[in-house]
Image (cartoon, rainbow, N blue to C red):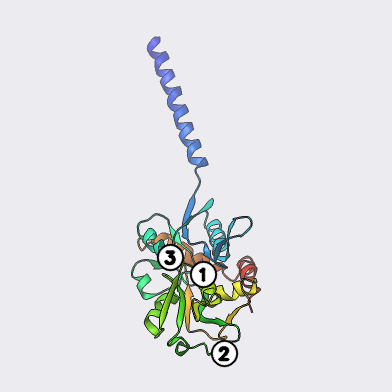
């Protein structure tokens, strides 16, 4: 009788354990970890007053994640120069940070299809009239963000007299405003956004053209082909839908 009782107790305990495990499975969240650098408005930045992490990239990847079945998108804010290094080490699943596709980056990580096109532009002090060409940079002090595609382009395509390396586009603008640099090279979309929102009235774009057109995409680990395929399918099927177009207008609608 005692033996049967003990067997019954064991069965009940095993059942409770199984139920507990089942409940744990139900409540587990499917999380997409994304590396980003929050100093690149309007792609990603912290709102000045609230400190909320926001931007086109942030809203875009949240929508992509939701449509792919993720319960949450978790962001890891990393220095831009370390973003791909962290992705290679699998510290996060993907990187979205206004990241242009380049052969050097493609050697390290895999890219989705582009989700937006940008380009490099020269920014000059108001009143300075020079063309938006690489010859304008010759013999001048040029401010540029470290690790950016603008930095790589300036280093390999110009004969600037001095390269003023800074940590962000805002810092590059201020270098020109404070006469620490004669001009700067940066993302046209980012500079246009900052100027449209009153960051500075002392500088202007050198022209409507771009020095170099670049394609912006999401990066994933080379081994993560499943995530790459899912992201590409979502971008292919939904990037032109009203929801995604509204996300674009929210951040780029004010840019002329």
Q: Which residue is mark 1?
A: 171
Q: Which mark is residue 129?
A: 2
Image quadrant occupied by the N terminus: top left
Q: Position of residue 254 (x, y in %)?
A: 66, 74
Mark 1 or mark 3: name the one nearer the start of the chain. Answer: 1
Residue at 40% in and 75% down:
102
Image quadrant occupied by the C terminus: bottom right
222 vs 120, left or right, is left
Q: Position of residue 228 (x, y in %)?
A: 43, 63
Q: Nearer the observer, disc 1 or disc 3?
A: 1
Q: CA distance from mark 1 to mark 3?
A: 26 Å
Which secondary structure lies at badge 2? loop
Residue at 43% in and 57% down:
93
Which secondary structure lies at badge 3? strand
For label 3, the crowd category at 10 Å Cα-Cα, with few meaning under 14, some 14 to 19 and many 20 or more, is many
For label 1, the crowd category at 10 Å Cα-Cα, with few meaning under 14, some 14 to 19 and many 20 or more, is some
Mark 3 or mark 2: name the one nearer the start of the chain. Answer: 2
């Amino acid at each position: 009788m005692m033996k049967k009782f003990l067997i019954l107790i064991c069965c009940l305990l095993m059942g409770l354990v199984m139920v507990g495990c089942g409940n744990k499975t139900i409540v587990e969240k499917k999380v997409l970890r994304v590396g980003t650098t929050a100093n690149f408005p309007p792609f990603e930045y912290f709102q000045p007053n609230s400190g909320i992490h926001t931007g086109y990239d942030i809203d875009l990847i949240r929508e992509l994640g939701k449509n792919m079945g993720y319960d949450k998108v978790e962001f890891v804010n990393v220095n831009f120069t370390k973003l791909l290094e962290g992705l290679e080490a699998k510290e996060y699943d993907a990187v979205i940070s206004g990241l242009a596709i380049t052969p050097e980056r493609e050697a390290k990580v895999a890219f989705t299809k582009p989700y937006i096109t940008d380009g490099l532009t020269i920014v000059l002090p108001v009143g300075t009239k020079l063309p938006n060409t690489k010859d304008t940079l010759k013999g001048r002090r040029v401010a540029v963000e470290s690790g950016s595609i603008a930095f790589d382009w300036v280093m390999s395509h110009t004969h600037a007299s001095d390269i003023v390396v800074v940590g962000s586009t805002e810092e590059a603008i201020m270098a020109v405003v404070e006469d620490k640099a004669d001009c700067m090279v940066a993302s046209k979309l980012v500079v246009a956004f900052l100027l449209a929102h009153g960051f500075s009235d002392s500088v202007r774009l050198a022209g409507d053209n771009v020095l170099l057109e670049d394609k912006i995409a999401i990066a994933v680990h080379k081994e993560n082909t499943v995530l790459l395929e899912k992201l590409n399918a979502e971008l292919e099927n939904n990037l032109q839908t009203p929801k995604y177009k509204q996300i674009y207008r929210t951040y780029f609608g004010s840019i002329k």
